[in-house]
Image: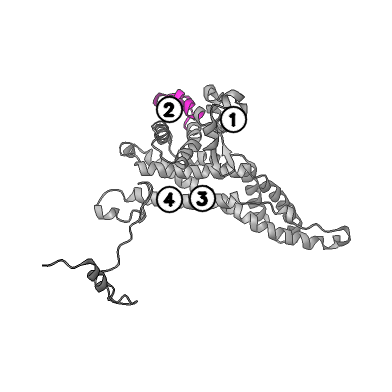
Amino acid sequence: MAAVPVEEAIAALSTFSLEDEQPEVQGSAVLVSTERGSTVSPIEYSDVSAYRLSLTEDTKALNQLNTLIQEGKEMASVLYTYRSCVKALPQLPDSMKHNQADLYLETYQVLDLEMSRLREMQRWQASAATKLAADMQRFSRPERRINGPTITHLWSMLKLLDVLVQLDHLKNAKASIPNDFSWYKRTFTQVSVQWPDTDSMREELDDLQIFLSTRWAILLNLHVEMFRVNNVEDILQVLIVFAVESLELDFTLLFPDRHMLLRVLPVLVVMATTSEKDSESLYKRVKINRLINIFKNDPVIPAFPDLHLSPAAILKELSMYFQKFSSQTRLLTLPSPHELPLREAQEYPCAFLK
């Protein structure tokens, strides 16, 4: 059979009709989804049941963790872009003081919308802490210690913990939040005089005030949830070993993943040393010099575009709330960025630019 010249083949193809709604002999191609890592499932592990593996419980937990991670990132974006409303509120001149009650009511309505977002974040972090703690406790049961969490599950736990750390840091760093809340509470006192039943609202207001005024309130709540039922020191140590080895062996190819591990590692170390016995067990698996070298190599890490964190500073701040960790003098003597000598600080130019 003689070969058809290319020019004739092209001319023949140009005669084909490509009108819309023309029947297709072959169906449309299946969408191929690609991700940068193997820890993400575009179909939410819905194909696991077809393989008849005992992973239904794990994949369900993974989907819940991933949903919380996405919700937490949205919460962090809302909190990061939060701006003070008090400066934009009008002030009445002395000649209009008789309209003060109306101004208080309108001010309360404006601030209540902003405070509702903070209340939503408070409720979300409580549910996220409960879910993460329950997941850790599930792997702390004797029957699950042999068949422990997969690498994908470890990453999901660390990512959710990182979201909680970022939210806590943003809450601590935003000076506009306590300013707005003080005005909100003041206006509530003025406008609630004429309301019939405000006990539940006052209780909710007090809870929100404690949440906003307590530094690292989210991590403290997570710690309470983790040790409410079972001890989770074993899974905490597994997470620490995984994070340390990933950082030392450069398992993380991208800086966001590396920074995520650096943000959660000091928190994990503090929470895993709840007693002298746990401290000895941890430092047998991970030598303290390895932790010191990691924290020294990255004295400053980004939390958000213009907000940064220091692992050494996190260790020192959390030690005030965890008395058992306060005896770890070698880790607590790590200098914070502002305490580094100038010559030594110049040895870490990359750490400030990552």
| Residue 158 percent location from the top left of the image | 44, 41
Q: Residues within 10 Å of mark 3 (few under 14, many from 20)?
A: some
Q: Classify mark 4: helix, strand or loop.
A: helix
Kindly indicate whether the residue at mark 1 contacts the one at mark 2 (C-beta within 8 angstroms): no
Which of the two discs, 3 and 1, labels the residue nearer the N terminus?
A: 3
| Residue 125 percent location from the top left of the image | 53, 48
Residue that label 3 marks: 73
Residue that label 4 marks: 66
Quadrant including the N terminus: bottom left
Q: Nearer the viewer, mark 4 or mark 3?
A: 3
Which of the two discs, 1 and 4, labels the residue nearer the N terminus?
A: 4
Tell me which amino acid carries mark 1. Pro
How far separated are the C-alphas under marks 3 and 1? 27 Å
The answer to whether 171 appears left or right of 27 in the picture is right
Kindly indicate whether the residue at mark 3 contacts the one at mark 4 (C-beta within 8 angstroms): no
The answer to which image quadrant residue 17 occupies is bottom left
Q: Which mark is residue 337?
A: 1
The answer to whether 47 appears left or right of 176 in the picture is left
Residue in the foreground of this view, choosing between 40 and 298: 298
Residue in the foreground of this view, choosing between 60 and 66: 66
The answer to which image quadrant residue 231 occupies is top left
Kindly indicate whether the residue at mark 4 contacts the one at mark 2 (C-beta within 8 angstroms): no
Q: Classify mark 3: helix, strand or loop.
A: helix
